[in-house]
Image (cartoon, helix red, strand yellow):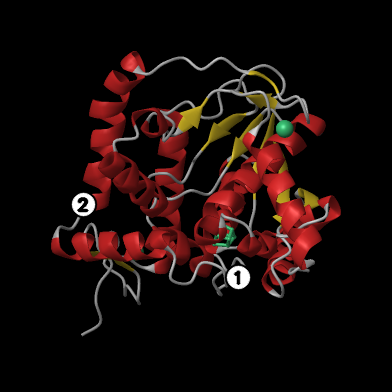
Amino acid sequence: MPARCFRCGGEAGRYYLPHMRRMICRDCLVDFYEKKVRNTVLKYGMLRNVNTLGIAVSGGKDSMALLRVMKRLFPTLSMKAIYIHLGIPGYSDECEDVVRRVCGEMGVELIIHRVSDEGYTIPDFQHTPFKSRICGACGTVKRYHLNLIAYEHGIDTIATGHNLDDTVEVLFELYLRGEVDEITRIRPVSPGVGSKMAARIKPLIEMTEEENLYYVEATGTPYVESWCPLVKGSRMMRRKELIRMIEERIPGFRHTFFKSHVKRFLPRLEESSKQVQLRECEVCGMPTTSNICSYCRLRSRVLRAVEAYGKTGA
Ligand code: SF4
Ligand SMILES: [Zn+2]
Ligand SMILES: [Zn+2]
């Protein structure tokens, strides 16, 4: 007998929600997902004071789900999608094609920035001391450009597609290492500072990877299925695997961990964490806590590598 949807009793197909130990049908999944995202957005006041929202899109399932659901839930909100082309051979072009197609179908303006215009690509970091932490360097590059693009295009708030699994993976590592200041930065909403630092929101922070995947599939939203070739064997992937194993043994582990962080730890940690003083980077003029921002330092490293080894990416 086919499994039944826990909401309407209809045939559930293949949509299984492990943390609830329930099956759900396609139509109920779409409705359930959209209600859950709406609740998250309202609960944390994510759209308070937003004039223009930038949606960071990578072409993967999470950011495509984010774009689709935000457009569905808030159709009158001014939105612009931002794609950072990282110069990863094959992969970055494939992602750009998907992002262009989805933005075109949804009528969302798309801003594209190519890091190769600055003389390097992400694979070039393989010739720098960041080669074993390439995702960390890539994260800095993406954060910096999202913020810069927001500043240049009058975007006051940036939404990213971080899901519950991403968040728990990062928290897991930070709690293990006792990185208190970093832990306080893992939150659903980070307010903006002045005109050069946009606010950040994570509308999918309570959605699991499975839910995002089901949503793009159920709504027929195109997305890039392949993984970034640079992620293979990374520590991040190993931690995610570990968290999946824990979730199998303790269903609801991800939700419990996240809730404890937001409700119990974050308010206390915020009280005791030091307020950082921002100043302008001496090289690029964007906000930073030191004389030269982490992006400008990374960029000069990778440009030295390109000079020595030539360019790797596309
Ligand atoms: S997997 Fe790592 S290198 Fe690849 S796009 Fe993501 S952060 Fe960048
Ligand atoms: Zn149903
Ligand atoms: Zn700088």
Task: Specify whether 164 is left or right of 230.
Answer: left
Q: CA distance from mark 1 to mark 2?
A: 28 Å
Picture quarter with ligand 3: top right
Mark 1 lies on residue? 224
- The residue positioned 25% from the left and 82% from the top of the image is 2
- Tell me: residue 244, above or below residue 13: above
Image-quadrant location for residue 64? bottom right
Quadrant of the rendering where the N terminus is positioned? bottom left
Quadrant of the rendering where the C terminus is positioned? bottom right
- Tell me: residue 67, above or below residue 307: above
- The residue positioned 71% from the left and 75% from the top of the image is 90
- The residue positioned 48% from the left and 25% from the top of the image is 45
Query: Which amino acid, by three-letter code, is at mark 2?
Result: Phe
Front one among 299 and 5:
299
- Percent position (x, y) of residue 257? 24, 43
Task: Specify whether 73 is left or right of 280.
Answer: left
Image-quadrant location for residue 76? top right
- Percent position (x, y) of residue 89? 72, 73
Q: Is mark 2 within 8 Å of ligand 1?
A: no
SS for tag 1?
loop
Q: Residues within 10 Å of mark 1 (few under 14, many from 20)?
A: some
- Tell me: residue 306, above or below residue 217: above
Residue 22 shows in the view: yes
Mark 2 lies on residue? 253
- Percent position (x, y) of residue 70? 58, 45
Task: Specify whether 268 is left or right of 48.
Answer: left
- Percent position (x, y) of residue 289? 59, 23
Mark found first going from the N terminus, 1 or 2: 1
SS for tag 2?
helix
Query: Which amino acid, by three-letter code, is at mark 1?
Result: Val
Q: Residues within 10 Å of mark 2 (few under 14, many from 20)?
A: some
- The residue positioned 22% from the left and 66% from the top of the image is 245
